[in-house]
Amino acid sequence: MKIRVGVLGATGAVGQRFVQLLDAHPWFELAALAASERSAGRRYAEACTWKLDTPMPEQAGGLVVQPAEPTLKCDVVFSALDAGVAGPIEEAFAAAGYAVLSNARNHRMAADVPLLVPEVNAEHAALIAVQRNKRGWRGFIATNPNCSTATLVLALAPLERRFGLKAVAVTTLQAVSGAGYPGIPSLDILGNVVPFIAGEEEKIERETRKILGRLAPGGGAVEPLAAVVSATTTRVPVVDGHTESVFVTLGTDPGLDAVREALRGFRGLPQERGLPSAPAHPVLVLDADDRPQPRLDIGRERGMASIVGRLRACPLMGYKFIVLGHNTIRGAAGAAILNAELLHAQGLLGR
Amino acid sequence: MKIRVGVLGATGAVGQRFVQLLDAHPWFELAALAASERSAGRRYAEACTWKLDTPMPEQAGGLVVQPAEPTLKCDVVFSALDAGVAGPIEEAFAAAGYAVLSNARNHRMAADVPLLVPEVNAEHAALIAVQRNKRGWRGFIATNPNCSTATLVLALAPLERRFGLKAVAVTTLQAVSGAGYPGIPSLDILGNVVPFIAGEEEKIERETRKILGRLAPGGGAVEPLAAVVSATTTRVPVVDGHTESVFVTLGTDPGLDAVREALRGFRGLPQERGLPSAPAHPVLVLDADDRPQPRLDIGRERGMASIVGRLRACPLMGYKFIVLGHNTIRGAAGAAILNAELLHAQGLLGR
Amino acid sequence: MKIRVGVLGATGAVGQRFVQLLDAHPWFELAALAASERSAGRRYAEACTWKLDTPMPEQAGGLVVQPAEPTLKCDVVFSALDAGVAGPIEEAFAAAGYAVLSNARNHRMAADVPLLVPEVNAEHAALIAVQRNKRGWRGFIATNPNCSTATLVLALAPLERRFGLKAVAVTTLQAVSGAGYPGIPSLDILGNVVPFIAGEEEKIERETRKILGRLAPGGGAVEPLAAVVSATTTRVPVVDGHTESVFVTLGTDPGLDAVREALRGFRGLPQERGLPSAPAHPVLVLDADDRPQPRLDIGRERGMASIVGRLRACPLMGYKFIVLGHNTIRGAAGAAILNAELLHAQGLLGR
Amino acid sequence: MKIRVGVLGATGAVGQRFVQLLDAHPWFELAALAASERSAGRRYAEACTWKLDTPMPEQAGGLVVQPAEPTLKCDVVFSALDAGVAGPIEEAFAAAGYAVLSNARNHRMAADVPLLVPEVNAEHAALIAVQRNKRGWRGFIATNPNCSTATLVLALAPLERRFGLKAVAVTTLQAVSGAGYPGIPSLDILGNVVPFIAGEEEKIERETRKILGRLAPGGGAVEPLAAVVSATTTRVPVVDGHTESVFVTLGTDPGLDAVREALRGFRGLPQERGLPSAPAHPVLVLDADDRPQPRLDIGRERGMASIVGRLRACPLMGYKFIVLGHNTIRGAAGAAILNAELLHAQGLLGR
């Protein structure tokens, strides 16, 4: 019997991606859709201006949108809520016993909330027990990283695990779907580059270090990785797919071949357990000079991998490469679903 | 009386920009246009598929395109030739007594060829005497940098001059006009990022150090700056304007205000002498969060400035910022014309 | 002494274009800027997110934005107000004695309001007296057409005047700046075509016939032209410049050469009187196969002409061609300013 | 046992689409790939710069590219050759006994060559016998229409069949993939519209009438439909998907509902026979105001349908609508494959 799940903020860009990815999921059944007052009470097919390039799943289209209140008939909720409202709503659901898998930024950096990337830090799920205990909740909140961080950290993790990681300088070229809908006005981005995304650089710098950190002795918190991360973020006229130019200094100097093999051979719990949304290769390494490219490569591994190319030595920092990730799949809805699959495999999803 | 000038490779993208910028120039008169055999013998208006957004100057349109041979009736030639043919042609012109102002990469790194940015290293023009002497030429070759380097180095120079420069990590987001015409196929770049430009990173890394270098004692060569420069270059769907994300480590730690003032207050010989193509401010510093942007800012200072924004402290390298420049004006034709103006002001242009 | 003018809706996309075009206008002095409550009280430089590719004029930047109420210190107001609020505000200004030159759609089709294109129907200005008389206003409202109509009608007028016009089938490919700011979300238009613009087809069909119509005997109203106009409108990823594919049936069959000459030779009152914003050629006819193109041609005649290309015989309707126009200049702010110049030349602008 | 097929011109844009669509085809086995001398002798994976957004099929990647000569080990060849060379090569293959399914324009209008759209004119396949007889060939050539025509004619056929068709005025907004690779230079199309495609309008006007024509008595030729078709073609910055604005005059005036039902209910032989590449609905009619859109709808029916929207009455011609089709699937490779399936179902493919 499938686990009943709901989506909060179901009419937005990330909400739609949740609905798309949950269609015909082997473990989860989409049982509830919630959105703002304006949409509540209407069938999803009418309330939602669908902006994905596959048709809206029929079953979802027939659901009546409900208010985002903890009376939804399901056990797990995926939150695609805006940060402006996500905080208290997610807390109310967790208090009421729901497992909340959130894509919002609000609770990511809280000491007792895991910021999970299943291939990287599955053990951080231990914070859930701490959180329940501390807050007296029957449910819990677990989060996935910001879209740029998600792509970056999957490529850094194998290097950090194998060689240590001292420093990262990253410049992102981010797609417009990362800003939701209506999001970026076309006058701002057609034939243009906008060299600023509010709050994004701080998220990359902080979240990367938390995700790559270790559980402190006792397991009650995460000690962030002692690496320096510096980010510059830009927006480019691409629909889906964040491209990132990365310079890294490792703890040792293993040579290019070892770095490439570490990336290519990287596997984690999702691959070992065969989680339904797990990519076969969480990090794909392309050898062609001019790849990865959003238009050509963003669909690889169903959008769930970080795709690395142009790996080479850097005269300044040691190594440099390009990494591409699907910002609304591995960078948002797909990440949260993989987190739910991980927690289910760890026996943490039942009410 | 104006100095008669010619353009080699006049029908290409950079050649057209030369023709546009030389129209009504106060010192130079466009007297000759040369291109490949295919175009020679036809009026420029017929031989050239004009791709700029201002009409082709009438006077230029009426000139008959000639072969790129040193029989042109002029004293100065601007070279927009492809690197595949530029080498020997430019040498033949210089040997025959022409002043060759070249945008091609072929001779930029030769020890006796100046790679000039007039605000930065006007004194490198001393190499011209060395070159003439060594090669027995009546004329000479002087070069301007690659388009990405041109934008970058104008922003680095004030920092290097004032505080010293140890290291630079730069990621470029380059416009398609930098690849000429037909250049990048639309299937490669519409809604896409291509994370590779052949040879570009090496050019940025080498040329930057030569431009910022000092004349060795005796004046016969340039000692490149002892800084580490590491570049990653990408192509984005923008028509004109290279955007660059720059991380720098300076020789001292002067503080953000001093860095900003050094950039803002930067002036050089072109400004002092009032050269016709000189920008009033070679480095414009914008304070708005989300600037510079190619679509909005590329026309500032008639395309002759480097436009800096998002200047801030970097936890890793010291400082980071965005810089934007017009790749076919300050990054190509405009740069060569400013070089010619400089050399004229230094009395080096007469035959 | 210059006439003092104001702009209503000054912070929006069309409002900014008014401010740009009025800078250093020989007859008009920008004395007042008005916008919504949210902006009122702040300096224009702070209240307005400037989205044009030339810097905001300094004089305008220093003006304090005022509420859109008829207490502005000026004699003429240009209205760039949203249709949602333009109706009563413009009426209040006209009642209070201001000459209102409106780009809004609200009053365009009113029987006593002229819908002016100075080269085409300058005599429709006679409606102003009717309007004042009927409504008891000291001021008046005069309007310019919708952006697509403006471009189309300039190319139809010379044909209608010379040969008669029976039928028009037009398909537009419209730029995003026509929808204002924020306007079209980038997710809707990047790499896409949206085949619908609300209300646009009706405007083209109605306004074209009014503009080309004749004053009824007595001069109290316009009899619309008895031609059939059918439009399909689409949005394409272009920043500025509406392209229109036009099929026309004329009253006679004059032959291609005569059609071309009628377009090319077209002049009107603005050219005869030398109005400051008048294009030398209101209709430019290009002979190259593949023109006009927005990127290359939109700046011709400072954005004030309709640029025709691909003029040829049509096996179905008689003739077909492409026409391009600048939607925020001749299609909006520039049109209203030219109207004001016309009315000033006709002695109608004084209070 | 599958029929062995080959692709001529396999490395180009349409050639790649053939390779993609033939992967795992239930009836056909990709046995041979041919291309120009430059590619011949190399493995396809090396000879071809793959530009589709799914990975190159492994089996195809391992094939060695051969010269385009009639010694290929297969029975059917799909031709994606350039028109500059397709004529004699296709004839040589047909003479040598191959069934040639050609996407090239060279033979489309020949009196004894069928120009097939299986839902529309399957009976035109009778020309194959005429062709073989007349030319003494063991094989034959059958063609599919130009990409714009393919999309248009699927939407016209149900109307012509039911109500008669008198006149069509169509304006296309065509994607860049229609021009192959490298095709359109990015400088020509970024943020731009190019209102001209060489030869395209004539193709639409002629091919539409042939496809909708009837076999003359005796069956030896096609009598083109006596309708007037007038086309204007433009290129827009879209990767895949031609959008067309269509105005039609029918033989009767059936009313909007009947027109809609005729489109929606349209079926043909491919649907009746269940051909593997047949779309369930050859014409999809969308009711939303702002559809179809290339980005959202181009994947419907696996790119094999014409997608109609904005169907409404036209005051000039009777009816107007928008139609969208996938230019390299239903407009090229998919069309030829469906033709092969049709001919196989008719028993015409065996050698």
Image: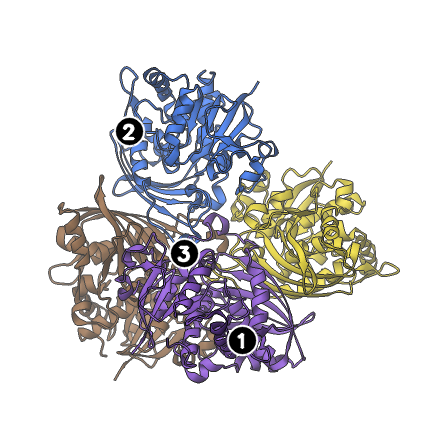
Chain colours: A yellow, B purple, C brown, D blue
Residue designated by label 2: D164
Amino acid beneath label 3: Val
Q: CA distance from mark 3 to mark 2?
A: 38 Å
Badge 3: residue crowd in 10 Å (few <14, some 14–19, many ≥20)? many
Q: Amino acid at mark 1?
A: Asp
Q: Which quarter of the picture shows residue A323? A: bottom right
Q: Is residue C157 above or below residue A266?
A: below
> What is the secondary structure assignment of the residue under circle 1?
loop
Q: Which residue is mark 3?
A: C238
- Residue B15 visible to an observer of this rendering: yes
Image: D11 above or below C185: above
Q: Please give the chain letter of the residue carrying mark 1.
A: B
Spatial CA distance of label 1 from label 3 is 28 Å
Dot 1 corresponds to which residue?
B287
State if disc 2 and disc 1 touch (CB < 8 Å): no
Where in the figure is residue D243, as x and y percent of width and height?
A: 40, 43
Mark 2: secondary structure: loop
Residue D284 at least partly seen? no
**The N terminus of chain B is located in which quarter?**
bottom left
Mark 2 closeness class: few <14, some 14–19, many ≥20 residues within 10 Å:
some
Same chain under badges 3 and 2? The reply is: no
Instruction: Rate crowding at label 1 as few (under 14), some (14 to 19) or many (20 or more) other CA atoms within 10 Å.
Output: few
